[in-house]
Image: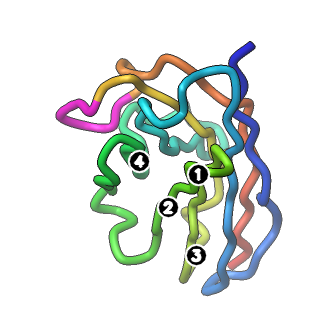
Amino acid sequence: EVQLVESGGGLVQAGGSLRLSCAASGFTFADFTIGWFRQAPGKERERVGVGCISNVDGRTRYADSVKGRLTISSDNTRNTVYLQMNNLKHEDTAVYYCAGAEVWGRRWQSEDIGYWGRGTQVTVSS
């Protein structure tokens, strides 16, 4: 059974930091691109994710809105991907979903996703 299980969400003040984890199982982790999408309150899940990492070659990709504040890393020995979020803003408040894709597409977009996690809530107080 394929599983992507997020953890690490919570409540943080603006300017603070959080690290999310995504533990993967049930598929060949090293062959996949793993990353994150988010869904803000009252909105649909974003079609283009905040960022991803290729476990094939370590390439990373970030949305312009988060560049410089978010860092994605991967530990292939633990089948876990991390999202380090610094200098958090109120507008970063969302449910963050871990996702996996077999392709490295032109963008990190929901159409390419094969596996989804259930999400973890991040709330940034202003």
Q: Is the residue under label 1 in contact with that under label 4 (CB below 8 Å)?
A: no
Q: Is the residue under label 2 in contact with that under label 1 (CB below 8 Å)?
A: yes
Determine the residue positioned at 54% across, 26% down: 28
State the CA–CA distance, disc 4 to disc 2: 9 Å
Q: Amino acid at mark 1?
A: Val
Dominant secondary structure of the magenta stretch?
loop
Determine the residue positioned at 70% across, 70% down: 124
Residue underneath mark 3: 88
Q: Amino acid at mark 3?
A: Leu
Q: Could you say whether the residue bearing mark 1 is in a helix, strand or loop? A: strand
Residue underneath mark 2: 73
Magenta stretch: includes residue 105: yes
Q: Nearer the viewer, mark 4 or mark 2?
A: 2
Q: Nearer the viewer, mark 3 or mark 2?
A: 2
Residue underneath mark 1: 81
Magenta stretch: includes residue 114: no
State the CA–CA distance, disc 3 to disc 4: 18 Å
Residue underneath mark 4: 52
Q: Nearer the viewer, mark 1 or mark 3?
A: 1
State the CA–CA distance, disc 1 to disc 3: 19 Å
Answer left or right for 84 relative to 105. Answer: right
Q: Neighbour class for label 4 at 10 Å: few (<14), some, many (≥20)?
A: many
Tell me which numbered mark, 3 or 2, is placed earlier along the sequence.
2
Q: Neighbour class for label 1 at 10 Å: few (<14), some, many (≥20)?
A: many
